[in-house]
Amino acid sequence: MNENKGTRKLIDARMVILLSSQLLVGLLLILAIWGLPARNISSGHISGRGDFYREVGNKLQTAGVVGEAIVAYERYLSDNKLDKETESKISFSLGNLYEENGEYEKALHKYYAVQAIDESSLDSQDSSKRIVALLERLKKYNAAKFELKNQTALEKDKVEVNQGGEIVAKIEGRPIFNFEVNEALDQLPEAYKKEFSGKDGKQNFLRKYVADELLVAKARKLQYQNDGKIRRQLENIEKQLLVQRVLEDEIGKKISADPADIKNYYEANKTKFNKPFAEITKQVEEEYKMQKGQMLYSNLMEDILKTEDVKIFADKMQ
């Protein structure tokens, strides 16, 4: 009887140890999944994730999974307080990844960040070359010329050299550069640009820009970007932008405004205009360009429909 009790106690003790071990492993696994620091039970200290996300990023990058590598490296940057050299290298790697992924604006942001972290580093010098190439790719030719000029003008004052990449705000340590704010301002309709003209206007726009960035960050935390309706709207916007780009390349260059053609167009439509040519020259020119653009677009559309494998069932559209 005593032997049975002793055996039972031994079994119970082993079960307690086994269950405790399983609970500990489960706890560590949960902490690892959620990216929280795991407690070292024996020492009583907490050890951080360290290079975990950097190692994951390296493996993903090697495997060619660019999007996930970006996520891992960004997490590594945000989770760790890094020295200048490491922060510069990771930021430069992110710039390369964003560029490879076709996200040129984000790549540009990272390359400028590398310069801001440590101007004297080799990564900063390489970033300068990538900045010029990206600005040209984005058709920011004046900015590219300015950047190239700064790189070769060593005798210039430091403030002058840094112009175009000056930090005007920070959001949780992330720098906001004046070129980003100026580009956002340039994209506003002319009527709104006047509201933000002058020094006070630009400062107000900067505050608005930062507030918008914070709202976007909040929306992402709430996973609004995964909402089906928003995704469809974004897809439609992307389609329109791509179509617009093709039309600019295919048609924009062909819409000329030869004075003789404009005059002939006026003469052919004189009864419609009902005013002397000298008074409405600009109006006639704009209308001529619009009509020519519509004609070129119709021709382009017909050519595409003929050359591609397309079937249209117009009678089914109600």
Image (cartoon, grey):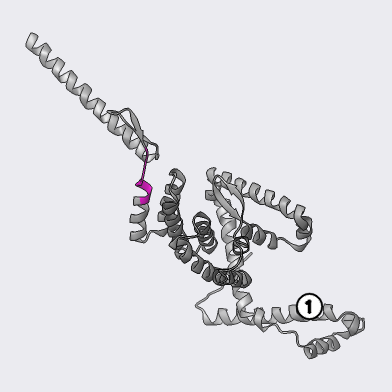
Residue at x 45%, y 58% (from the top left corner): 94
Asked if the stretch drawn in magenta spans residue 277, the answer is: no
Q: Which corner quadrant of the image does residue 152 belong to?
A: bottom right
Location of mark 1 (residue): 286
| Observer-nearest of 295 and 67 | 67
Left or right: 19, with 232 as reference point:
left
Q: Nearer the viewer, residue 219 or 99?
A: 99
Residue 116 seen in render: yes
Residue 12 lies, in percent from the top left, at 18, 18
Outermost residue toward the right in this view: 275
Nearer to us in this view, 168 or 140: 168
Q: Position of residue 220 (x, y in %)?
A: 54, 47
- Give the extent of the magenta segment: 48-54
In this rendering, the count of numbered labels is 1
Question: Tag 1: residue type?
Answer: Glu
Task: Please tell me whether mark 1 sits on a helix, a strand or a loop.
Answer: helix
Say which residue appears at 54% left-offset and 46% top-offset.
173
Residue at x 48% of width, y 60% of height: 120
